[in-house]
Structure formats: structure tokens, C-alpha cells
Image: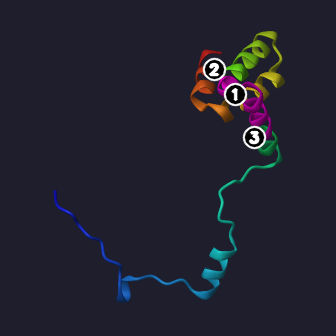
Amino acid sequence: MTIRLATALTGRARTRLSKAQARAAIARPANDNLFDSAGDAMMHAALRQFAQHGIGAAEHARRQAERAFFKGDRETYQWWLGICRTLDRRLAGSLTNSN
């Protein structure tokens, strides 16, 4: 197997940021948590759910969502689906595909 080394660009090939571009890049937040207040509420609810039910928290949220769905309570269904999705996207996906 050959090993290839990519060297740093030098001379004209290297791009430089202007001072304004550098300031703009530094001013942006480094994290990618772009949650709004609803997303924060969902994250806190999912963490509470996990603290209360442990490793089975997503499955419990799934059961709650199914229960709400069959009662016709759309708002509660969406809430529990969001919690399930936050904890386990695959499980939430199977819930939305089956209903």
C-alpha cells in the first residue's frame, strides 16, 4: 500500500482571508447548537425522560406516542414523537412509518 503525503500549499495557491473576513469568522459561534426555545424544551424533556426511564426511555416515549395517536390526541403524539426522535431517531422513524 502506498502512502501519499499532502503538503501544505505555498505561494499563490494558498488562500488568505482579509482582515474583515477573519474578524467575521472569529465572531461566529464555534458550536452548532442552533436550537430555538422549543428545541431546548424538547432536549430538556428528553433528558428528563432518560433520567427517569434509563436505557428504555426511547421505547417508553414511543409507547406514549402510540397511545396518544390512537386516542386521536395529535398534539401529545407530536410531543412524545419529538422526545422519542431526540433519544432514538431510528425508533422514531419506525413509529412514523407504521402510523
14 vs 30, left or right, is: left
Which dot, 3 or 2, sits closer to the camera?
3
Q: Which mark is residue 38?
A: none
Q: CA distance from mark 1 to mark 2?
A: 20 Å
Q: Which residues are magenta?
A: 43-58
77 vs 55, left or right, is: right
**Does the magenta-highlighted stretch encompass residue 56?**
yes
**Could you tell me the amino acid type at mark 3?**
Met
Indicate which disc, 1 or 2, sits on the residue closer to the N terminus.
Answer: 1
**Could you tell me the amino acid type at mark 1?**
Gly
Local secondary structure at mark 1 = helix
Q: Residue furthest left?
A: 1
Q: Position of residue 92 (x, y in %)?
A: 63, 26
Name the residue rendered at 76%, 12% in the picture: 67
Say which residue label 2 marks. 95
Q: Residues within 10 Å of mark 2 (few under 14, many from 20)?
A: some
Indicate which disc, 3 or 2, sits on the residue closer to the N terminus.
Answer: 3
Q: Is label 1 in contact with label 2 (beta carbons under 8 Å)?
A: no
Name the residue rendered at 21%, 63% in the picture: 3
Q: Which mark is residue 54?
A: 1
Name the residue rendered at 74%, 19% in the picture: 65
Q: Position of residue 46 (x, y in %)?
A: 75, 34
Say which residue label 3 marks. 43
Q: Is residue 11 above or below residue 22?
A: below
Local secondary structure at mark 2 = helix
Q: Residues within 10 Å of mark 3 (few under 14, many from 20)?
A: some
